[in-house]
Image: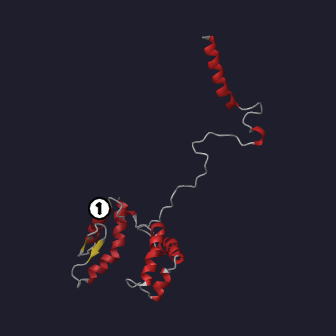
Amino acid sequence: MRRNAALMFAAVALTVLPGCGSAEEPGKPESGAAPRVATLQSGAASAPSKKAERPRERLDMTPEEYEALLEPYNKCMREQGFDPRDSRTKGEVAVPGSDAEKKVEKANQICEPQYLPLPPWEKDPANPEARDFALDVVKCLKREGVKFVEVSEDGISIALGGDQNDKRSITLGMDRIPDCEREVAAKN
């Protein structure tokens, strides 16, 4: 029995003692080496895995803020051979089936998933409360005197229409939508 106890003590000592360090000053690395620290990472270096999130619009953005938010997307499109600003100023339109349309689609497939701003959370199809937000905006618009307004078929967008002779109601709706959106968002 004593022999087994002695062997057990020796095994524990051989296992524990190498971790105790050397006769040098505690906390100092041995012979200039960095101190070893236990980690959960493997020995192989790994690249950061955090994927950059797309920017998101806000309901209270100014046109200047939106243009700044859109700049990484526009830069990516230019790098892919399509300049959105040039096409707007030159009045170029990508006709269906044309080489220009194919160029735009190819550039957009690369740039949109990375850089095109997401809609405001209140209007995002991924938001389960987006339809409620749209319904509340419609109620606000009706209180403001907009006659022909409803939530579109997509369940998120606001549709103005009805009697096309009542352009005043449509104009009022277009003017009041941003205010009603901010009012509804402030209540939530």
Give the SS element for disc 1: helix
Residue 59 appears left or right of 4: left
Residue at 58 percent across and 52 percent down: it is 46
Vertical placement of 4 versus 182: above or below? above
Residue at 28 percent across and 68 percent down: it is 154
Q: Which residue is mark 1?
A: 132
Residue ranking furthest to the left: 163
Residue ranking furthest to the bottom: 90
Vertical placement of 148 versus 139: above or below? below
Vertical placement of 141 versus 47: above or below? below
Image quarter where the N terminus lies is: top right
Image quarter where the C terminus lies is: bottom left
Residue 146 appears left or right of 88: left
- Residue 99 rendering spot, x and y as whole percentages: 44, 83
Vertical placement of 36 versus 93: above or below? above
Which is nearer the eye, 98 or 122? Answer: 98
Residue at 27 percent across and 76 percent down: it is 160
Residue at 61 percent across and 49 percent down: it is 44
Residue ranking furthest to the top: 1
- Residue 136 rendering spot, x and y as whole percentages: 29, 64
Which is nearer the eye, 80 or 97? Answer: 97
Query: Dot 1: within a 10 Å radius of its alpha carbon, few (fewer than 14), some, or many (20 or more) residues?
Result: some
Residue 53 appears left or right of 175: right
Residue 184 appears left or right of 36: left
Q: Amino acid at mark 1?
A: Asp
- Residue 149 rendering spot, x and y as whole percentages: 25, 73
